[in-house]
Amino acid sequence: MTHQPSSAPDPSAAPRGHGLRRDIDLLEALASDEAQNAGGLGVVRLAQLVGREKTQVSRALKALAAEGIVERDPDTLEYRLGWRLFSLVARTSENRLVRMAEPVMHALSADLEETSHLCVLSDREVLTLLSVSGHSFRVHGWEGRGVPAWQTSAGRVLLADATPDELYVRFGTATELPVHELWALIQEASRQGYARVSEEFEAGLVGVSAPIRDFRGRVVAAINISAPKPRLGERLDVAGHTTAAAAARVSALLGWEPRRTPRHPGHGSPDRSASAMGVEFPRMIRELP
């Protein structure tokens, strides 16, 4: 009686998990800096990145899109991570960012007597991961929902690390707001430590947002306070400073040390902002309609 060496592969076990691994490879590619900066990737490029046939990648993406795990831009036909994936992340109680932010947000909401929201950037949209009121319970109406980044105070702080060129790639033809105006609003928010909007996203609604930074100093999330204008409109700056202090506490829990980590964009590189480089906003972008 002979024995098959233990190191020999088992043909019956080879396919196990193989399809899932391939799907994860596609999701990893769609989560890459290249995909995020471009706002999505096409089938050909994704096939190159994962080393698979284009037809196989196309079939896999269609199946993932049908479940909301990825989504396809109807204009560019490029794929990006989908709403359902972010919604699943939003409901994951072990998510470190959510766990660190939630108690701070409860205190902030109680202080301002308004609902606070934990937001992240998803392509051209701001996605709400968590909402809490000032009454020690979570408010689920906004969780998993995305809104246009250029219309919100959260979007303006979440884009703090972007260069003018990156803004143009992501938003150049996708917004009602000229990119050079969006850049100016982002820079204003960076200078004052928070962003504020008044009825720009929705009539009668005002809000403030402040950035949460990771241990590298990179903006990874924002805390937002939104409320009807009659209730919050006259104390937006007070709310802004209070929200900025709360966001700084969460940043500290994530390892950010402001004395050691420069507050500038570039993921640890020198400040890449136009003002820091002594140049004005690119003319081709300033002249966009």
Image (cartoon, helix red, strand yellow):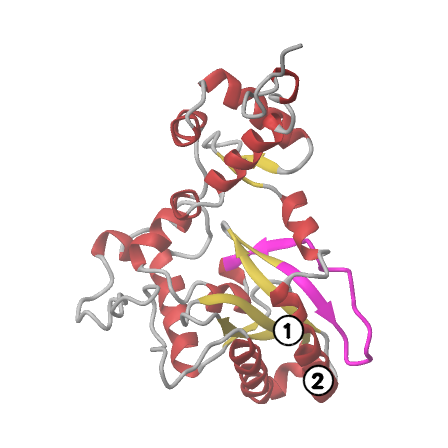
Q: Position of residue 99 (x, y in %)?
A: 67, 69
| Distance in Å between CA atoms under marks 2 and 1 | 10 Å
- Determine the residue positioned at 56% across, 66% down: 200
- Determine the residue positioned at 43% across, 81% down: 257
Going from N to C along the chain, the mark reached first, 2 or 1, is: 1
Q: Which quadrant of the figure has residue 85?
A: top right
Residue marked by disc 1: 101
Residue 184 appears left or right of 273: right
Residue 158 appears left or right of 11: left
- Determine the residue positioned at 46% across, 51% down: 175
Residue 146 appears left or right of 288: right
Q: Which quadrant of the figure has residue 246?
A: bottom right
Element carrying mark 2: helix
Q: Quadrant of the N terminus?
A: top right
Q: Relative to the observer, which residue lies in front, 184 or 240?
A: 240
Element carrying mark 1: helix
Q: Relative to the observer, which residue lies in front, 13 or 144?
A: 13
Q: Position of residue 166 (x, y in %)?
A: 34, 53
Amino acid tagged 2: Ala
Q: Which quadrant of the figure has residue 218?
A: bottom left
Mark carried by residue 115: none
Residue 289 visible here = no
| Numbered range of the magenta stretch | 128-149
Amino acid tagged 1: Ala
Q: Is residue 164 magenta?
A: no
Residue marked by disc 2: 107
Q: Is residue 146 magenta?
A: yes
Disc 2 + disc 1, Cβ < 8 Å? no
